[in-house]
Image: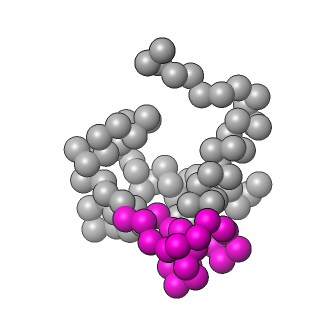
């Protein structure tokens, strides 16, 4: 799971300053663009693979994240904690 850990670190770094629930990231100059046409993570964060990749922009910085891997990170967070995230809006 080291790759998922590093992926998570990059994701947290590029979204630094945003609320933990990622509500209104635009207020912190964070934006995203999705490219690709199929959900898979065989090629990682490669923008030329055709896999769905989320490019996150924060100021002059950009990081690319494979969407299938983002889903895997969220799933792994559940496996590691054994609980689903708390929904404060319930």
- Does the magenta segment cover residue 41? yes
Figure check: 87 above or below 2: above
Camera-side residue of 82 and 3: 82
Give the residues drawn in magenta, as a range: 33-54
Q: Residue at x 22, y 44 (%)?
A: 27
Q: Quadrant of residue 21?
A: top left
Along the horizontal axis of the image, is 30 left or right of 15? left
Q: Which residue occupies the foreground of this view, 10 or 56? A: 56
Residue 32, above or below 25: below
Taking the image as shown, residue 80 lies to the left or right of residue 43, namely: right
| Image coords of residue 25 (percent x, y) | 31, 45
Residue at the spot x=35%, y=37% of the render? 23
Residue reaching furthest front?
A: 37
- Give the quadrant of residue 33: bottom left
Tell me if 24 is positioned left or right of 53 in this view. Answer: left
Name the residue nearer the viewer: 82 or 13: 82
Horizontal and vertical percent for residue 47? 50, 79
Q: Mainly helix, strand or loop, the magenta region?
A: loop
So how many labels did they put on this image? 0
> Is residue 24 found inside the magenta-colored segment of the image?
no
Residue 49 seen anywhere in this rendered image of the structure: yes
Question: Is residue 7 visible to the viewer in this orientation of the structure?
Answer: no
Residue at 45% in and 54% down: 13
- For the point 36% across and 60% down, the residue is 32
Tell me the quadrant of the picture where the N terminus can be found. Answer: bottom right
């Amino acid at each position: 799971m080291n790759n998922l850990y590093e992926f998570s670190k990059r994701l947290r770094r590029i979204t630094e300053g945003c609320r933990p629930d990622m509500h209104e990231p635009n207020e912190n100059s964070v934006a995203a663009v999705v490219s690709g046409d199929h959900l898979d993570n065989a090629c990682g964060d490669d923008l030329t693979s055709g896999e769905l990749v989320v490019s996150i922009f924060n100021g002059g910085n950009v990081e690319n994240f494979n969407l299938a891997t983002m889903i895997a990170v969220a799933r792994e967070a559940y496996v590691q904690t054994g609980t689903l995230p708390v929904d404060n809006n319930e």
